[in-house]
Amino acid sequence: MEKTLNIPNIQAAMEKAGLSQSRLAEKLDVSKEIVSKWLSGKKFPRPRMLLELALALELGIDKLVIKKPAANEPVIAFRKRAGTKTTPAHVEKAKEMGMLLEPLVPYLPFDQFLRPATLKDPRCDYDYIQTLVKQIRDDINISPNEVLDFQHLITRFKELQTVIIPVLWGEKSNHSNALHIYLPLTQTTWIYLNLDVHAHDFKFWMAHELGHVLAPDLRDDSGEDFADKFAAAILFPKTVAENAYKELITIRGQKKQIDVIKKYALKHTISLITVYRQINVYAHHYDLKVVDLEKVVYASNTNFNKRFYKISESIFDNTMPTPKKYIRKCKEVFKTPFFYALKQYIADAGKSVGYVQTILDTPLLDAKGIHAELS
């Protein structure tokens, strides 16, 4: 992370305090030349002087310093559990994992000279999103009314040369259910997916991550907004939302309306909330009366969630897998080249258990088993 001084904030604070460069230098007991170099961006204060400068100008460090990502620094995005926050420690840990992924790139079965096509001008407006998902569904050869299943998404990731890393992070032990890492130096994308979550959430997160892969230039809130809208639309497109809306408005009573929403959610393996929102996004776009189930749909979704299995339970037959079974099933189900690349790198570079533990963010005992299986 590169750091620079926030010159506009410093100049405003100096003006407010009536300090010239000379007066500020005297106050800090440094030369005027040093202050001049600070304010021209030629030099950055040492930690002690940075603190002295913050105190002299009555500025917090966050107002005094601008942190810029280094040119080839991993770009991180989390898909977090509700109510959890991403701390600087989480970000730094994810960046460390990203830097450790870089040596695996030569072992990936991807074209080293060409990267897959991404969207020219991704936007969040309704018509653009719907046109995009229709084109993708046409490419996959499924109609607007058909269910987009997990294998459709996995195949699309493979075509876009995205590396899926399935992990067993548990339900509560990790603050994120998906971790997206883009490595600018090699222009590769790596997506950690936590298998210890329920199917409807997992499917939405996969589609959300696909949105990020298609629109890599959109970052922060704009990237998250696009990925969310894309995920909801490709899983529950306009034609299905239209049919659901027409069915809902003919029914009286919230309980019966919720039952209709449940029917669609079960068929498409998505949450009641996604179905409900997409119905009203459709209604709003076409100036139709929205369906008001706000007070009951969230409570109903909590109970509905219990009906879904966890992905890990389905893949591993409701048992804790051995390292051998974990690797084999992940390769079979997700078509991921990750374990092949990891195996080759361990052999060529002589990497230890600690490398596996860090790169998978897994307990030491599990890392030992996976390392032994790959060695």
Image (cartoon, helix red, strand yellow):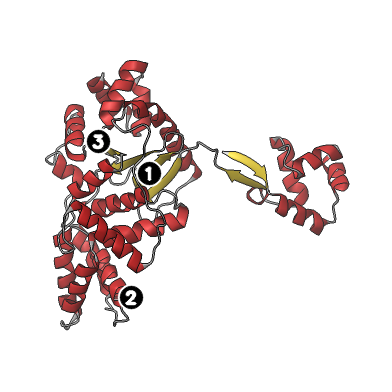
Q: Is residue 344 above or below residue 99?
A: above
The amino acid on which the numbered mark 1 sits, given as a three-letter code, is: His
In the rendered image, the quadrant that contains the N terminus is top right
The amino acid on which the numbered mark 3 sits, given as a three-letter code, is: Thr
Where does label 3 land, which residue? 336
Left or right: where 205 falls relative to 239: right
Where does label 2 land, which residue? 285
Q: How far apart, in angstroms, are the residues tagged by discs 1 and 2?
A: 31 Å
Residue at image coords 31%, 39%:
161
**Considering only order in the chain, which callout, 3 or 2, is on the residue closer to the N terminus?**
2
Q: Is residue 80 visible?
A: no
Q: Nearer the viewer, mark 3 or mark 1?
A: 3
Percent across and percent down for residue 38 are 75, 41
Q: Is residue 146 visible?
A: yes
In the picture, the disc for residue 180 is 1
Q: Which is more toward the observer, 216 or 292?
A: 216
In the picture, the disc for residue 43 is none
Q: Secondary structure at mark 3?
A: loop
Residue at image coords 24%, 43%:
195
Q: Secondary structure at mark 2?
A: helix
User: Toward which corner of the image does residue 167 lie, by quadrant?
Assistant: top left
Q: Which is more toward the observer, 101 or 318?
A: 101
Crowding at mark 3 (Cα within 10 Å: few <14, some 14-19, many 20+): many
Q: Which is more toward the observer, 372 or 132?
A: 132
